[in-house]
Amino acid sequence: MKFGEVPVEEAVGALAAHSVRAGEMVVKKGTLVTPDIALRLKQAGIGTMIAAQFEPGDIAEDAAAFRLAQALAGDNITVEAPFTGRSNLYAETGGVLLIDADAIHGLNAVDEAMTAATLPAYKPVVAGEMVGTVKIIPYAIPEVLLQKGKDRIGRGALRVAPYTRRTVGVVSTTLPGLKSGVIDKTLAVLARRLEPTGARIMQDRRVPHEAAALALELASQAVGDTELILVFGASAIADRRDVIPSAIEMAGGRVEHFGMPVDPGNLLLVGFIASKPVIGAPGCARSSKENGFDWILHRLLADVPVTRADIMSLGVGGLLMEIVSRPQPREGGESEGEE
């Protein structure tokens, strides 16, 4: 594509790169310059203008953006018709946004003329939410450049994993000092948390904060109809040998990982019993504010694998709130509830 200042008569067939005003006449940016427009500009005393002239092999910005967006779109992603060199991508269903980050970085590194931007990976999204956008910077790019960009991104770098787990079993452990109202409030907060995902609390069980009692309940839920088990401890998990991880192992399960580099949410545990995922919830999960529990909960509801490596990669961006004023760790029960 040629770009620059040319006599108006030589701009015929090109695009006006900038708006041109001549008296009451206005030629808007991006307008195709016709012989009539060029004549009227000349008559109005305009001798030159900044124009963009396509060359053989050029692909117009809208077509280029649309083709890149189509290549990026994977499962449950729809592509909007392009405009002004931009094509947006939207979630077709609620779920968790999955992104091939290397593909996005690869496209953006090809040439400054092509750009792609997305929401953060693993973000929970709703149907109709914009999840990404492709923007072509100039009015056109060579087809060879467009093909290079498509080669870098491959196919389906953006997709939405829909929520598939719909039934949740909750086990709350109790201690003499824990009021039942705290558990009731926790369940109400959880129900609101689950609402956008289409999941519901199918079982609500309360057992003493003892490994043996908890193990019996977990084993029962593992063979039941619930697809995800959540454990809210009366006391936060402090060690892999604590009540909740011990109960999971006694029930025939395994602890995938304990601890998370997300704050609030450090004391979260992920395990499995009979291939059914179990979350040992941190104290902050009792709050409606976003915390590390949300990140893991949504992934598991969308049947997105959560491994130790996945959890330990969350540190960058994992500081979700200011903690300077928080009481020192284990300075009474309140600080445990924040973890």
Image (tube, rainbow, N blue to C red):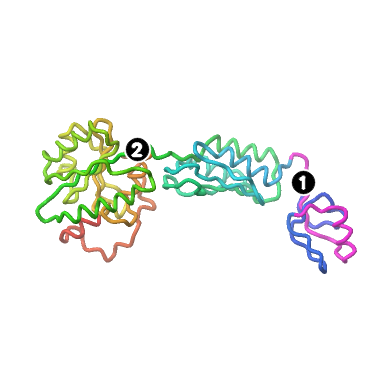
Q: Is residue 257 visible?
A: no
On screen, residue 40 above or below 174: below
Q: Circle 2 — which element?
A: loop
Q: In the visual, does 112 lie left or right of 157?
A: right
Q: Residue furthest left?
A: 176
Which residue is the site of mark 1?
A: 54
Does the segment drawn in magenta span residue 334? no
Q: Residue 208: x and y, percent?
A: 11, 45
Going from N to C along the chain, the mark reached first, 1 or 2, is 1
Q: Residue 19: x and y, percent?
A: 75, 61
Location of residue 181 by image quarter: bottom left
Q: Residue at x 46, y 40 (%)?
A: 160
On screen, residue 307 above or below 131: above
Between 61 and 81, the one nearer to me in the picture? 81
In the drawing, what numbered circle is on residue 165?
2
Q: Residue at x 29, y 38 (%)?
A: 228
Does the segment drawn in magenta span residue 36? yes
**Residue count near mark 1 (Cα–Cα under 10 Å), binned few <14, some 14–19, many ≥20:** some
The residue range painted magenta reads: 31-57
